[in-house]
Amino acid sequence: MPALQDKPAQDKPMRQRAPPAVLQPLPEEAADLLLDKQKALEVFWEKVYKPPEAFKENKALLKEKIEEAQGLGKEALKLKNEIDVAKTALLRLRTERAMTAAGPEDTVVEDGPDELAEVHTIEQLKGRYREKTAELRRAKSDVEGIQRMLEQNQAKVRREFENWFAGLRGRAHMSRLDEEKKKELIDKVSGQSSGAGTPRVPKDAPQEAQPSPKVPQMRLPLTSSG
């Protein structure tokens, strides 16, 4: 008996998956959420809003890039310190050679083997330093790009939440509420129309982007011989 093979169902129309249903709270719940916008935001984030997979990936990538930039900054700073040490050693060697050299005071004293070795070390360190700071700038640019995307996502979440929150008013039927809650709701909604505080974003919701890591303030390129 020949093996069965999967055949495309050409005679059956493809069914499109329906979008997930948006949570519609009961009238009493809608009234409670209207009275507590912070709680409403938490409910929206936990039960209504479904963050795209790219958002989670970008958050993880941002953390990775910030750590990378911080590591590169430390390495660049270490190289800068090594350059300063080498330049100080070179200056000391040149001063000692000038003090012990024979001849008139204005005689130009050429570098000896020790000085030349120190100059070579400085040049090597400078090359590594320039490479490291170039990597740092690229990492910093990546961080800023990811931050912009997260800020755009946060603005989108805010808009969606405000639309959802406004829709709660239509579900909080006044006829189903007691007099005390009616008065509280009317006072609250009236206060919101004149300006209300912004609720705190839940811990796992899109946050304001963190400041990008700073590139060490160092002059480039360094002078060749100090």
Image: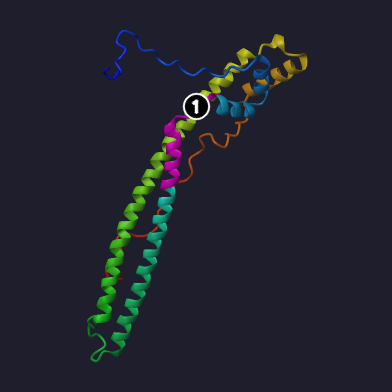
Quarter residue 167 falls in: top right
* Dot 1 amino acid type: Lys
Q: What residue is shown at x 42% (from left), y 59% (from top)? A: 74
Classify 35 as above or below 10: below
94 or 170, nearer to the observer? 170
Residue 50 position (above or below residue 208): above
Point out the stretch of residues depicted in magenta: 48-65
Residue furthest to the front in view is 1
Residue furthest to the bottom in view is 102
* Magenta span contains residue 51: yes
**Residue 80 location, x and y as percent?**
37, 64
Q: Which residue is mark 1?
A: 50
Which image quarter is the C terminus in? bottom left
Left or right: 187 with respect to 68?
right
State whether residue 28 is above or below residue 94.
above
Looking at the picture, the colour scheme in use is rainbow
Q: Residue 216, located in which quarter of the rendered image?
A: bottom left
The residue sitting at 36% across, 45% down in the picture is: 141
Q: Secondary structure at mark 1?
A: loop
Magenta region includes residue 67:
no
For residue 203, what is the image quadrant?
top right
Residue 138 position, x and y percent, is 34, 48
Which residue does the image show at 50% across and 27% down from the upper left?
A: 50
Is residue 15 visible in the rendered image? The answer is yes
Q: Is residue 152 above or below residue 77?
A: above
Q: State the quadrant of the N terminus.
A: top left
In x, y percent, where is residue 41?
Answer: 59, 28
Q: Residue 169 location, x and y as percent?
A: 62, 16
Q: Badge 1 local density, few (<14 within 10 Å), some, or many (20+)?
A: few
Determine whether, in the image, residue 223 is placed left or right of residue 184: left
Res. 213 visible in picture: no
